[in-house]
Image (cartoon, helix red, strand yellow):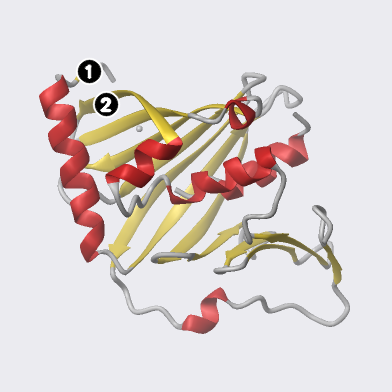
Amino acid sequence: MKPRTHFHFAWLCLAFGLAAVTAPAQSEKFLDQWIAAQANLRTWSADVVETRALKTLSQPLVSAGKVWVAIPDRFRWELGQPAQTIALRQPDQLCIIYPRLKRVEKYPLDGKQPGPWRDALALLDASFPRSRAELESRFQLLSITQTNGIIRLRMQPKSQAARKFLSEISVAVRAGDFSPASTELTFSDGSGIRNDFSNGILNPPLNPDLFKPDYGTNFTVVEPLGK
């Protein structure tokens, strides 16, 4: 997979010491508690540090930024200060803005995208599952581990098409409030992208305009997947 493709998949999967795998009964209990906690979640914001370890790079690339989420279908993700990349998810599209390049890429979220891309879009919801049935329909749970107050879930997409690109996803949450601590994507070629979250705030008031694309008329707008 090319570096740019890795980058796009990283945006699409919004969502970790020595650790022992939890017993099945504990795993079942945690899953139920984690999903139940989502019922009270409306918004979330945090600082993020993204680390990209790609096969084509001799050293990992580290970028700091900020993320805002409005449940169920909006987020804003900025990397760089000032922002060099902005990803906006809306109900019907994912918009990626490159301010320095004056370029905008739009990806539809209408269920009509090709198989692998459609499966990858399902990863957007992995960190904030709305129901256990929905989570288990998309992912196979490999393990749940806990250490130092952090619980990590290792999962893989059930779709064979998605696994051609993405072999594993890890979601780590804080045991106290089930808020995201980190996410990690492992691609089929061994590359990986990790996001570590800090200073998270549950249910902050967020201006709806935060999730609207805002760019100049001099930006080039493209739709890589076509109509």
Q: How many numbered discs sit on the rendered protein?
A: 2
Residue type indicated by callout 1: Val
Residue 139 image point, x, y percent: 42, 33
* In this rendering, position of residue 146 left or right of residue 48: left
Answer few, some or many: residues within 10 Å of disc 2's Cα (few below 14, many 20 plus, some between 14 and 19): many
Residue 171 image point, x, y percent: 38, 37
Q: Is mark 1 in CB contact (under 8 Å) with mark 2?
A: yes
Of residue 58 and residue 18, the one placed in the foreground of this image is 18
Residue 71 image point, x, y percent: 39, 66
* In this rendering, position of residue 105 left or right of residue 156: right
Answer few, some or many: residues within 10 Å of disc 1's Cα (few below 14, many 20 plus, some between 14 and 19): some
- Mark 2 = which residue? 144
Of residue 56 and residue 61, the one placed in the foreground of this image is 56
Q: Which mark is residue 40?
A: none
User: Which quadrant is home to the C terminus?
Assistant: bottom right
Residue drawn at 28 percent across, 44 percent down: 132
User: Which quadrant is home to the N terminus?
Assistant: top right
Residue drawn at 23 percent across, 61 percent down: 39
Residue drawn at 18 percent across, 21 percent down: 22
Residue drawn at 82 percent across, 54 percent down: 224
Residue type indicated by callout 2: Ile
Q: Earlier in the sequence, mark 1 or mark 2?
A: 1
- Mark 1 = which residue? 21
Query: Regarding mark 1 in the picture, which secondary structure is present there?
Result: strand
Would residue 3 be visible to someone looking at this image?
yes
Of residue 106 and residue 140, the one placed in the foreground of this image is 140
Above or below, 190 against 138 in this view is above
Query: Regarding mark 2 in the picture, which secondary structure is present there?
Result: strand
* In this rendering, position of residue 159 left or right of residue 103: left
Would residue 181 be visible to someone looking at this image?
no
Q: Gap between marks 1 and 2, in whole Å?
A: 6 Å
* In this rendering, position of residue 222 left or right of residue 151: right
